[in-house]
């Protein structure tokens, strides 16, 4: 899991995905027939075949913050990049891209109201950084939760597992594929957290016949609406707020898991969206589905996934790529 640690440790919020992209290119270059970085910054890794075009996707970006004002006291005011968890921000250590470190806190409350608001929050730069490097922070600089990768048994906790875990799955799938008849496009997308932007343009350029997104899903019960659990297997997406997955892909993933003696879970969400949502409506339409990695504490510094769920996701996707003749 050293590669997953490297992927999560870099500072790469939406629009600043290059550090992640560089690692992925380094890892997949020996196994790729073609590598393209498109105009938006999507990384497209192709393994050529004579069959149908299959697009497998996972987003590189993570949530974070962006500096908006440096006030008279030297504190950095900020706005969000993506749907970062406001409650998780308070008293969190943040790393700017130039490695300046600060701690997020709130203005003193004037009442007993403990709610958080971006307008009332600021980053207090750690003293040595403030003395020596504060003038290197500019309006528009971005930061994310500080790296904090931990493994305990089957569980991994870190920032940015949404969706560096998915990127890890695609990287390892690329490495393990020994043969393919289909034309495979592994797409590591940008700006998913800002509205699924990269996947839309990548799918338009590739024009795939089939697509499978690799995405996290929330395993924490929400009023009885979720029965997903870490370590109980990858989840095959049925629907979310952006897509009802095509029966062909859904059934393909179920059958593949069963053939590998992997017991899948099933994801039905009434909120949230994924890259699959824009891929399936691109052009004349794409037959699309998704395999999801159960994840706890989304968009916080301590997201959590299961190693076995990740490993089983790799097995399923590798088998689909090698054995599926469409």
Image (spheres, rainbow, N blue to C red):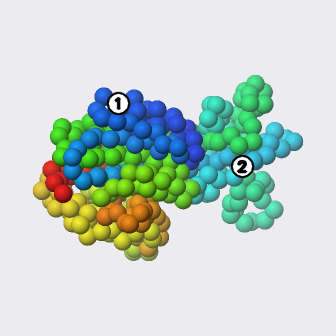
Q: Name the residue tied to disc 1.
A: 29
Residue at disc 1, secondary structure: helix
Point out the image quarter for the N terminus. top left
Q: Earlier in the sequence, mark 2 or mark 1?
A: 1
The image quarter containing residue 253 is bottom left
User: Whole-percent x and y of residue 184?
Assistant: 28, 46
- Percent across and percent down for residue 323 are 15, 50
Whether 185 is drawn above or below 116: the answer is: above
Q: Secondary structure at mark 2?
A: strand
Instruction: Tell me which residue sits at (64%, 48%) in the image.
Output: 65
**Residue situated furthest right in the rendering:** 72
Task: Tell whether 232 sits left or right of 143.
Answer: left
Q: Which residue in the protein does label 2 denote? A: 78
Tell me if residue 214 comes above or below residue 141 in the rendering. below
Q: Quadrant of residue 112?
A: bottom right
Which residue: 36% across, 40% down? 45
Residue 209 pos. (x, y %): 30, 58
94 sits left or right of 303 in the view: right
């Amino acid at each position: 899991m050293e590669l997953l640690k490297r992927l999560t440790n870099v500072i790469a919020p939406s629009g600043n995905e290059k550090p992640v992209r560089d690692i992925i290119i380094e890892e997949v270059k020996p196994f790729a027939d073609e590598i393209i970085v498109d105009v938006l910054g999507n990384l497209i890794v192709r393994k050529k075949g004579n069959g149908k075009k299959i697009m497998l996707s996972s987003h590189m970006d993570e949530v974070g913050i962006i500096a908006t004002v440096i006030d008279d006291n030297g504190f950095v005011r900020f706005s969000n990049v993506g749907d970062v968890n406001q409650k998780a921000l308070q008293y969190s250590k943040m790393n700017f891209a130039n490695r300046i470190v600060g701690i997020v806190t709130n203005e003193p409350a004037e009442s007993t109201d403990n709610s958080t608001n971006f307008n009332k929050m600021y980053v207090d730069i750690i003293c040595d950084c403030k003395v020596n490097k504060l003038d290197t922070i500019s309006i528009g600089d971005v930061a994310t939760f500080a790296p904090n990768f931990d493994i305990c048994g089957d569980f991994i906790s870190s920032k940015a597992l949404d969706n560096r875990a998915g990127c890890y799955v695609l990287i390892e799938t690329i490495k393990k594929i020994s043969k393919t008849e289909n034309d495979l496009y592994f797409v590591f997308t940008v700006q998913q957290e800002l509205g699924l932007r990269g996947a839309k343009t990548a799918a338009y350029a590739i024009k795939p016949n089939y697509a499978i997104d690799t995405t996290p899903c929330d395993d924490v019960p929400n009023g009885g609406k979720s029965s997903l659990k870490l370590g109980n297997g990858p989840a095959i997406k049925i629907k979310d707020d952006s897509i009802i997955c095509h029966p062909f892909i859904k059934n393909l993933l179920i059958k593949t898991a069963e053939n590998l003696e992997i017991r899948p879970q099933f994801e039905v969400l009434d909120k949230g969206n994924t890259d699959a949502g824009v891929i399936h409506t691109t052009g004349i339409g794409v037959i699309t589905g998704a395999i999801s990695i159960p994840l706890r504490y989304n968009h916080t510094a301590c997201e959590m996934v299961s190693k076995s769920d990740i490993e089983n996701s790799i097995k399923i996707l590798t088998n689909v790529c090698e054995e599926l003749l469409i």
